[in-house]
Amino acid sequence: MSNQKGPHVLIVGAGIAGLATAILLERAGISYHIFERAKEVKVLGAAMSLTPNILPVFEQLGLLEDLQKVSMGFPSIDILNEDLKTVMSIDTSQAKEITGYSSTVFSRAELYNLLYSKIPASKISMGQKIMSLEQNTLGVMIRVNDGTTHHGDILVGADGAYSAVRQSLFKKMEACGTLPAIDKEDMRAGYICMVGTTEPLDQEKYPDLKKDYSKFVQVVGKDKMYSWTVLSVPGNKICWSVKLQLESEQQAKKMMFRNSEWGPEGNEDMIKDIYNFPSPFGGVLGDLIDATPRDLISKVYLEEKLFETWHHGRTVLIGDACHKMLPSGGQGAVNALQDAVVLVNSIYDMEDSTPKGIAAALLQYQQLRYPRAKLQYETSKMMAKLMLGQTWLERFIRFLFTNVLPKSVYLKNYVKSTAYRPMAAFLPFVENRGSAPVEPQEPSKRYLAEQAQKATAKSPIAI
């Protein structure tokens, strides 16, 4: 940036997207502060897997080794019927050869704690619920629940699918007649999901925990709209999730209660329904549920929507706040992290912190990310049909994928899907170590100029 004083960025939401944005801003030397509505950190959720589409950034930031310490590789994803007979298996054993990175899983808590540990305590405020926002040519202001106001140059809404930033922004845009009609529509709910991670378990009772890799299994229910996933993670723990497919939009709307938290409310009825489902690790799901702290079991509606509006004025949305995806494709967190990378790259390369400079940077961010997010949004919908679907058509799609589609087609699509790997343009790039090509990326011109200047300053002066 040509101005002496760079922008101050307000980040709303201390989830994975918000924390990643903060870490990247920290490395870019850009001022920021995080505001999180929760009074204390309580990590809910189950297992996660990050793909080669984002792992190079972890390597750039020096976080990959720490992540690998809490991860386990998985050679395949096995899909079984309720009799625990294999329906299909997705081979992931060639991932490292093709991409340079192994397919790994870990508990969501481990990733969250890793990212959270990198944020200086002075740069995050807990218990700060956003009540409203205002923005003009001079800056952006947020008002929080204790009545205080906070000012900055850019506001990042990283506060999830029920984003308070998005709701406040859209309300103002709608009043001005500038909000697209599609953004006024509700998100669509297709599933109810319950998740949890057990306490450490006895390896003698669960022999699969003795393996040095993760057993990753998806079970599709018989004559029921349920499917469930179980997989082992480091520490002798098992992550589990159960999804109930809603039969219609009408049913979804009838059941919706707009709970934005991954919280324990209303869990017991669903637990009774799923308790005796067979577990691929032995016994029944209820055994894993009983081994999971009740306050860390959470239930949510899995909704989906790709918003058209990602930014307006000095305000910008990332992650679930602008594209809520079904988790079946494993791309929700990956895309949120990619948003953070591309957004910070755009902010880093801003000409100045004027309204014009900020608008150009935020527009560039959406132009770069929207087509990619749209592709992954559609892919996640298809993967949900493949791995979770219970209608006759979805079962037929699963049959075709299993019995008709050549493995070479899957492999070709995998290579194509992992080629896009946006990296922090203000840090040294990570070389591709896989056999498959990756899409080229230009480093930041500002970064190159600064590196050249540093090199010149270090050069000995000729006498």
Image (cartoon, rainbow, N blue to C red):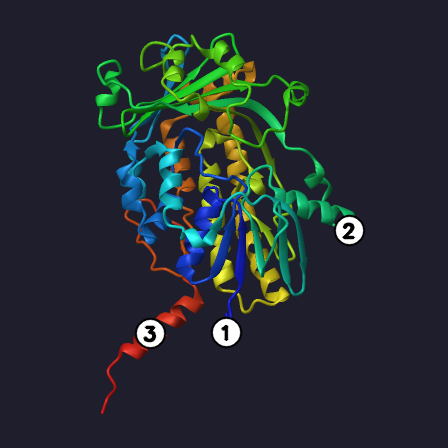
User: Circle 3 is placed at which residue position?
Assistant: 454
Q: Earlier in the sequence, mark 3 or mark 1?
A: 1
Where is 130 relative to 206, above or below?
below
* Crowd class of label 3 (few under 14; some 14 to 19; many from 20; radius 10 Å): few
User: Circle 1 is placed at which residue position?
Assistant: 4
Q: Amino acid at mark 2?
A: Cys
Q: Residue 326, labelled with which disc?
A: none
Evaluate whether residue 16 shows in this view.
yes
User: Circle 2 is placed at which residue position?
Assistant: 176
Residue 128 rendering spot, x and y as whole percentages? 56, 45
Task: State how far apart marks 3 and 1 are (Cα).
Answer: 18 Å
Horizontal side of 150 relative to 243 (left or right) equals right
Quadrant of residue 363 in the image?
Answer: bottom right
Q: Earlier in the sequence, mark 2 or mark 3?
A: 2
- SS label for mark 3: helix
Q: Amino acid at mark 1?
A: Gln
Evaluate whether residue 341 shows in this view.
no
Q: Amino acid at mark 3?
A: Lys
What is the quadrant of the C terminus in the image?
Answer: bottom left
Residue 110 rendering spot, x and y as whole percentages? 35, 37
> Residue at point 42% right, 8% down?
276
Question: In the image, which is nearer the foreground, mark 2 or mark 1?
Answer: 1
